[in-house]
Amino acid sequence: MHDDQQLEKETIRKVSLRLIPFLMVCYLFAFIDRGNIGMASLQMNHDLGLSPKMFGFASSLFFFSYFLFEVPSNLALQRFGARKWLARIMITWGLVSACTAFVQGANSLYAIRFILGAAEAGFFPGVLLYLTYWVPAAYRARIVAVFMVAIPAASFISSPVSAMLLQMDGTLGLRGWHWLFLLEGLPTVLLGLVCLAFLTDTPAEAKWLTAPQREWLVRRMDHERGERHASERVSTWKLFRNPVVWGMALVCSCASAAGTVLNVWQPQLLKSFGLTVMQTGLLNSVPYLAASILMIWWGRHSDRTAERRWHTAIPLLLISCGLGATHLSSSLAPVVVMLCMILIGAYSFKGPFWALASGWLATGSAAAGLAAINAVSNLIGGGLMVNVYGWVKEETGSYALALLPLAILSFLSVTVLLYLSRNASAAEAAAPQRRTA
């Protein structure tokens, strides 16, 4: 027994060290490339003549094409293998992101943001699916939380870096925001090429594991797939008719909206307090540092306690409190504290939620199911709420009022989550009775 436990520990450690740091770096650049439009807006909006509504619409177009192409992209990953498909995604989105430097007006910005969403579609659910091939369920929340720390880390790192790149204004005749898109997009292309050589599609092909480690992992993952009815497969149409999938997508949309809206609009919100571009970049990174640290701790705590329901619900409540409190202050320090609350909730939510969601989906429907949840939540959270924020901001001139629709969405998400998890618990309790009947 002791030898088996040691083998398990060594295998999980080797898999984690091999895959997670590299995937984190890839995902970090994904979020840098989709979110750097927020810092670029400090110069770009003036140059292109963008109003808040126009900027919000341009930012949201990424999520509409992301929605359209996400499920097909994840199914393509199953067909072609994770190594080739994830590399394809990274190379194309890196090139498209760099080309944002050449937009000439609102229409060309609209087009490039739509293409960027199509290029990146499938990367996140593809990695989630890929991890279900390699990471046993008991370790998944902490692993996913560590992997997804790349999201807040991307803004923590890119905010001051983007601010410095904006200072290159005039170099070689280019504006600072041109340099920002070029120098943050091209490294992703290189990562895509590295992906082809570095990733392994399945544990059975992992020559970097010892034979006992490889055999243990293959056996463990085959066993878990068997327990989750590996033979059950559903059509995409049937999947989208499943109310549980829609419910999980609505729950996820709250955290998605909070993270996306602040990623796009937070630099402008902070700069409205009279900060310089560099001060804005540095202060913009503070909430993301707090979120990066706490989301890892929260995911590990969820695994240690084997509890998912409240580890998913409590971050949603924290988002609600932070959003509601933004109406109570108009000074900088309290607003930064409230932004920290919102982002800590938005990112601490992710590890427990995706562990919960992947556990509710049968293996046959996991690829399309995870992609569908992520795509719909991004459509609501990014495509819709980023626009709503821009509309309210332009009509009222208030950043606080523009966050109010997010507060309503967060309360609705908590209600739906508790309802779904109660039904799931009841179904699990009834399953042993059906088997023994």
Image: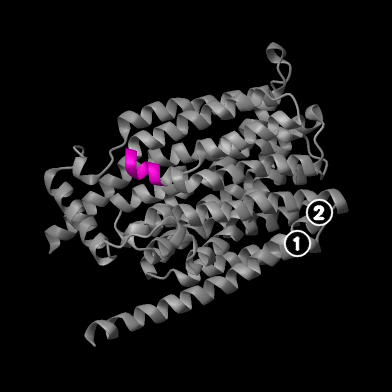
Q: Is residue 106 above or below residue 229?
A: above
The image shows residue 208 at horizontal and vertical percentages of 21, 38
Please check the rendered image and state whether residue 124 is part of the magenta-colored stretch, yes or no. no
Question: Image point 51% across, 43% down: which residue?
Answer: 69
Image spot of residue 287 (x, y percent) = 63, 50
Q: Nearer the viewer, residue 15 or 192?
A: 192
Structural crowding at the residue carrying mark 1, measured as other residues with C-alpha within 10 Å and reported as few (<14), some (14–19) or many (≥20): some
- In the image, 60: left or right of 393? left
69 vs 143, left or right, is right
Asked if 25 appears above or below 406 in the picture, the reply is above
**Residue that numbered label 2 is attached to:** 392
Instruction: Mark yes or no: residue 298 visible.
Output: no
| Disc assigned to residue 138 | none
Give whichever of 170, 423 is nearer the camera: 423
Per the image, label 1 sits on a secondary structure element best described as helix
According to the image, what is the colour scheme of the structure?
one colour
Which residues lie in the magenta part?
75-80
Q: Which amino acid type is marked by label 2?
A: Val
Front-most of residues 356 and 118: 118
Q: Are marks 1 and 2 in contact (CB under 8 Å)?
A: yes
Q: Is residue 287 visible in this depiction of the protein?
A: yes
* Along the line of sight, the residue nearer the viewer: 321 or 73: 73
Q: Is residue 261 left or right of residue 422?
A: right
Q: Residue at x 68, y 54 (%)?
A: 339
The residue where tag 1 is placed is 404
- Choose top left, top right, bottom left or bottom right for residue 352: bottom left
Q: Residues within 10 Å of mark 2 (few under 14, many from 20)?
A: many
Q: Main secondary structure of the magenta part?
A: helix
Q: Mark 1 belongs to which amino acid? A: Leu
Q: In the visual, does 5 lie left or right of 19?
A: left
In the image, residue 77 lies in the stretch drawn in magenta: yes
